[in-house]
Amino acid sequence: MEKDNDAIMLETLGTAITQLQVKYRSCGLLDRMAMKPALDELTNDYSNYQLRLLKEGVICSNDDLKAMEAIKGEIDNAAEAQELVGAIAKTIAFIAAKA
Amino acid sequence: MDQTNRSDNYTWSSAIEHQQEERIKMKYRLTFLVGFALVGCVLISGCTKDKAEAIMAVSGQFRDEASIALHQIRTLITMSLEMPANDPSKMVEDLEELKTFSDKELTFLINESKPDTSGSNAINGELASIEKQYDTFASMFSSLSKGFLFSVRSVQKAQEYAIRLTIQMINLANELQTGKIRVRCNAKRIILVEQVNLDKAIKDSTIRKERLLADVRLINELGQQEESLKKQALLQCFKVAEIGRQVAELIRNYDKLSIHEILAMGQQALSLGSQLTGQPLDLVRMLDKYKSIETSIRNDSYWSQILSKPVTP
């Protein structure tokens, strides 16, 4: 399966980060202290890019979530109604038995 | 007088008999009424407790497998940026090279191994909200076995979300397959790069070649490990997609299928994991299969109508 430009961009960014991390680890403490903010910034850029690509596949929204919660409410109400009907049926059956 | 008494007794016992007959009739009427009402409800809704429990079980499986898939994706993303822990001998070198050591350096060394997590927190937040969608989907049916008689319309509404969540999982599998979610054991890669560079610098050619041969084995192992992690995550996404497809079918035919058919479909979905695990994987073919399911859903006039409908919470 061919990679599209987004996947190539992510790969390029990721490879650059790994190379920088190798370089970083080979440096002395003072150099690492100087490099760390730039490395963190690049890592965050990568994460944000990854997040954007991840979101491309997400098709359920907050509205969908609310709609599902509303359906849950309806089914919960139906369970209460069914329980009530069951109780009425039992009462009628009791009266019928005593009649 | 005797005759009058006899006549009174006759009237009295006849009244009692009549009353008893009426009571029996009333009993039958009430029993018939209760029975008729319950049978009527089942016939109108076409639903039974068994059918409801089948949907609850399969939607619960859908949520559980989705949670595993999302956890795997989270691990893969974290791994793709991870750095190896600091080597104590390297830290000794650090300390030796410094002229003075202050709290500034101490703080840096303590925090160095803790990565800046603002970027990965956002990814984890997104994955948690996706997981919540599958959780909410399953929770919709938590009372279904108690309210199956009056829930047919609500259950029908839920099918839209079964399809959306199924397509969403196919999309995530596609992102894994096309490299939009990268599978890299970054920390192991860094250690291997460092190791190969150290071994390349060995002057003795015999030792150098031996070490590099060992490195080649490690390179191959790493490649296989990354491929295996990708396959596991893809397989899990496919498993979720297949269960989601079954849930959508169960919901679509909730009021039409017989109990036996519903239970058979539910059983099929629940045993899917073990069926897939034992088979060699042709991932490209599987992805094509699931993409074709997605395409057929989008082209199906019934499903596409549901999917294009605006969401009304």
Image (cartoon, grey):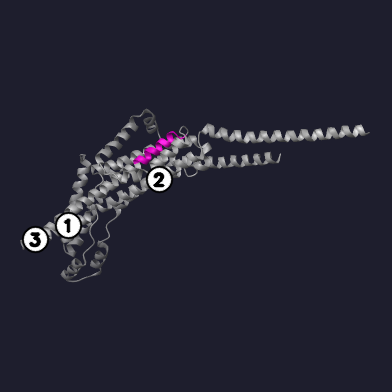
Residue A98 in picture, x, y percent from top left: 70, 41
Write down the residue under mark 3: B208
Name the one closer to the observer, B165 or A47. Answer: B165
Tag 3: amino acid: Arg
Position of residue B288 in the picture relative to residue B9 (left or right): left
Q: Nearer the viewer, residue B47 or A40?
A: B47
Q: Chain of mark 2?
A: B
Tell me: A89 left or right of B152.
right
Left/right of residue B24 with respect to residue B121 in the rendered view:
right
Find out whether the residues at labels 3 and 2 contact each other: C-beta distance under 8 Å.
no
Residue at x 25% of width, y 49% of height: B228
Mark before the other along the chain sequence, 1 or 2 = 2
The quadrant where residue A37 appears: bottom left
- Whether B283 is drawn above or below B120: the answer is above
Figure quadrant of residue B58? top left
Q: Would you call the spot at circle 2 few (<14 residues within 10 Å), some (14-19), or many (20 or more)?
A: many
Q: CA distance from mark 3 to mark 1?
A: 15 Å
**What's the residue type where badge 2 is placed?**
Gln
Residue at horizontal 44%, vertical 39%? Answer: B263
The amino acid at mark 1 is Leu
- The residue labelled by disc 2 is B61
Q: Does the segment drawn in magenta span residue B242?
A: yes
Which numbered mark, 1 or 2, is in the foreground of this view?
A: 2
Q: Which residue is mark 1?
A: B192
Query: The residue marked by circle 1 belongs to what chain?
Result: B
A9 in relation to B106, above or below:
above
Using the image, determine if residue B149 lies above or below residue B85: above
Rendering coords of residue B247 (x, y %):
40, 39
Which region of the structure is painted magenta? Answer: B241-254
